[in-house]
Structure formats: C-alpha cells, structure tokens
Amino acid sequence: MPFTDPELAHFAAEGPTPLPAGGEQGWVEHAGARLWYAAYGAGPAVFLLHGGLGHSGNWGYQVPALLAGGYRVVLLDSRGHGRSTRDGQTYSYELMGDDLAAVMDHLGIASAKLVGWSDGACTALCLADRRPQRVEAVLFFGCNMDPSGTKELTDFPPTLQHCIQRHRQNYAALSATPQQFDDLMEAVNLMQATQPNYTAQDLARIRVPVAVVHAEHDEFIKREHAEYLVQQLPNASWELLPGVSHFAPLQRPELFNEVVLRFLAG
C-alpha cells in the first residue's frame, strides 16, 4: 500500500526518507550568504526548491524517484534555511532566484527544469521571468504570485502544527545559528505578506512552460488563484491533486512523484 502521512505525524516524528549518501555536496558564496547544495545522479538537470522555513531534506521522498527516472537532481537550501546562512538583507524571491542562478553557474548548468514548492515555486517563476534562458520549465506547486491568492488562516490544523515542529527541530540541528528560527520565521513571513506582486501583464511575459499544480485542500492558496495563473501564463498547464494539502510531497509521495515525472518527461 502506498505510504501516506495525511496530518504529517510521521514527518513531525521522523522526517521524510533521508537524502541519499554520496553525491556532490558543497557551498557557494553569493550576495552575503553561504549556500549549501547537493547534486545526485546524471542526466538532464532538475532542481528541487523547497518551501519557506524548510530545507532540502524535505524532498527525501522525491529524490530516489527522480534518480530512478534518469535525472541529475540538484537540491539547494535557501539562504538562511537548513545549512545555508544569510546576512541582513531583506528576503525577496528575486534574491533567492539569483542565489539559484549562482549555484547553477557553480555546477556548470546553463539551464534546467525547476520543481518549486511554496516559496520555491515563487523563486522558480521569478527566475523564469528575469532570466528565461536559465529555465527550461517550471512546476509551480502551492504558491501565489500576488497577495490576492492567499487564504486567511483562521486556525492552526495538525498539518501546520506538525510541520512547524519538524522545521524548528531541523533548523536547530542544521543551522549555523540554531537559536534564530523565530527570527527566520519573522523575516520569511514578512516576505510572504508583501511579495510577490505580479500583475496579469507581468505574468503574460513569462513564456517558459509552467505546470501549475494545486492541492485540493491547500491551507494557504486559493484554487481560483491557481486557475487564474493558468489563464494568464501563456504556456501553462493545470493539475489538481485530490485529497492532499499544501504538503502533498510529504502526505502522498507517490502521487506527487507521478506528477513530477510527467512534468519532466514533457
């Protein structure tokens, strides 16, 4: 029977499957941050970009499936997340997109497909807008491109409680500043509350293929906003994931992996 973790109880207690041993791991200095990355396998390059407050280890269920599919899988801890450091600069998706481009330069990757989850999705699409020659296609899962796309969070369900619990533990274990998780959360929340601010005209200039993937029970993002993105992006496709929420890669990994592999094959 396929693994499921609907309320992220297993994620809170154990985390996902650990990332593979070996591969290439290292650091890239860029714009005041020391960025940790890991690369595995050979073949067409695909970057997995995690969400806010998380780190690359949250892709533990996806990496083996992509390696089995014949891809070179690259992970990046966003600045200030996981093993990566940050300076005093205000967070922005453009800055994190530039971080991604710096890692691509370091690895000699001219262009790649990007799989973005939450903040990672915004980072991917902003890079596709600003540097389209670096981005072959984007899987955009679980994020908004203007403030109207977010729901008002009126409660704190078990999924969010378990997610924050695990993020806090991982940050304490990995970060060079293990006592600063609350500072990170404040900085990231500010970014999320004020960015991005793309108009319909802004979206219309993004020509790379974009697969907009939305979870049926996403806690943060309105379905109508995801559908609006499909309408405004010139080269977009749509997929709705049934029975899961913002944390689909952790809740039903096999379902999410099927979507990612279809995207990469296309």
Image: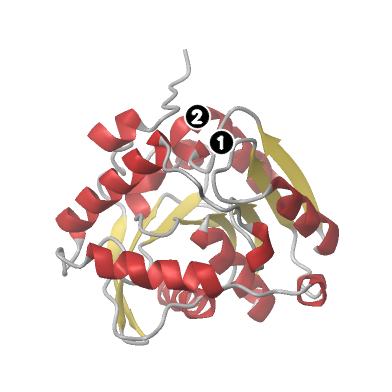
Residue 152 place in picture, x, y as percent: 57, 53
- 197 relative position to 29: left or right: right
Alpha carbons under labels 2 and 1: distance apart: 6 Å
Residue 145 place in picture, x, y as percent: 66, 66
| Residue kind at label 1, given as amino acid type | Phe
The residue to which callout 1 is attached is 256
Which SS class for mark 1?
helix
Residue 92 place in picture, x, y as percent: 49, 77
Residue 241 place in picture, x, y as percent: 65, 34
- Count of marks placed on residues: 2
Q: Are marks 2 and 1 in contact (CB under 8 Å)?
A: yes
Q: Is residue 219 visible?
A: yes
At a point 27% along the width and 45% down the height, the residue shown is 165
**Residue 5, placed above or below residue 35:** above
**Residue 91, placed above or below residue 71:** below
At a point 85% along the width and 57% down the height, the residue shown is 231
Please tell me how crowded label 2 is: few (under 14), some (14-19), or many (20+) other residues with Cα within 10 Å: many
- 49 relative position to 128: left or right: left
Please tell me how crowded label 1 is: few (under 14), some (14-19), or many (20+) other residues with Cα within 10 Å: some
**Residue 94, placed above or below residue 115:** below
Report the colour scheme: secondary structure
Q: Is residue 36 visible?
A: no
- 206 relative position to 99: left or right: right
At a point 43% along the width and 66% down the height, the residue shown is 189
| Residue kind at label 2, given as amino acid type | Arg
The quadrant in which residue 198 appears is bottom right
The residue to which callout 2 is attached is 252
The quadrant in which residue 228 appears is bottom right
